[in-house]
Amino acid sequence: MVEVKGSYCPTVLHQCVEGGRTHDGKPSHDPMPYFCDGYRPGYAKCLKPETPKHFCIDLYEYPNKIGALPEVFVSWYEAKDACEKQGKRLCDDDEWTLACEGPERLPYPYGWRRDASRCNIDKPWRKPNDGILASKERNARVEEELARLSQRVPSGAMPGCVSPFGVKDMGGNVDEWAVNVTLGGKPYKSVFKGGHWCGGARNRCRPTTESHDETTRYYAEGFRCCANPQPI
């Protein structure tokens, strides 16, 4: 695991200077649009009081092993149980954000500009067979469908996809379950962070996807674990 110690800002203002777009791809001059190719370097204005944070976070996506494909098709409850069996816990979404953006509050874990060569992002979408993925059991048909859809890369395969704290693969590869702290557990206790490999994901440190409940299981969704620091 990686130790993270720093100040978290609940609301940060960045300034998009290149490629700002709305969620449906229309040009946007908003300083923080849905999509942005490049932000003003060094500009990250904190708009609310900061909170000190100190925690540990897995270096890689679960199972947290270099060279292993990240686990997918797990619900928030299953992810929570898997972390707790290791004496850890699911990360709070604000912890995840701090570990991703670092002290400079970068919009992307690796800097101020979106770069598909750094992380596993922007891959072409493959239409899923939701009839198969609706299964409550992880049977042979589900495994075959997951293999067909998968564009995961092994943990650590993209060394440039690293945050200022040294955490790997936070911008892409698989969406990561976290605990919804920022929005007070509404509409669900669960959120996704980081985005997945498919084109159309924002893959930034700050955004969350909060439209899926805790029972959701899908082909590009995984997790990583956090833990409280051990006293010396």
Image (cartoon, rainbow, N blue to C red):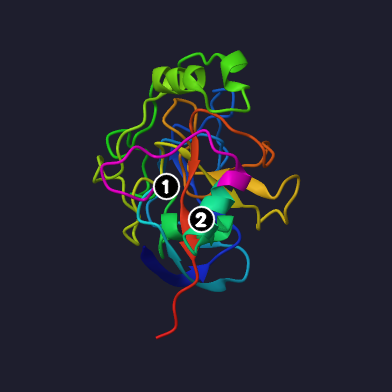
Q: Residue at x 35, y 56 (%)?
A: 59
Quick check: 70 left or right of 12? left
Quick check: 166 left or right of 7? left
The residue sitting at the right extreme is: 187
Write down the residue under mark 2: 83
Where residue 134 appears, as percent x and y from the top left, is 63, 22
Query: Mark 1 and mark 2 in contact (Cβ < 8 Å)?
Result: yes
Indicate yes or no whether the magenta region holds residue 71. Answer: yes
Where residue 16 appears, as percent x and y from the top left, is 47, 42
Q: Assign the magenta stretch its main secondary structure.
A: loop
Residue situated in front as seen by the camera: 62 or 57: 62
Q: Which residue is drawn at 47% across and 69% down?
A: 55
Magenta stretch: give its range.
Answer: 62-78
Q: Kindly tell me whether residue 44 is visible in this rendering.
A: no
Q: Kindly indicate the quadrant of the structure image that contains residue 94.
A: bottom right
Q: In this view, does 45 lie above or below 144?
A: below
Quick check: 17 left or right of 48? left
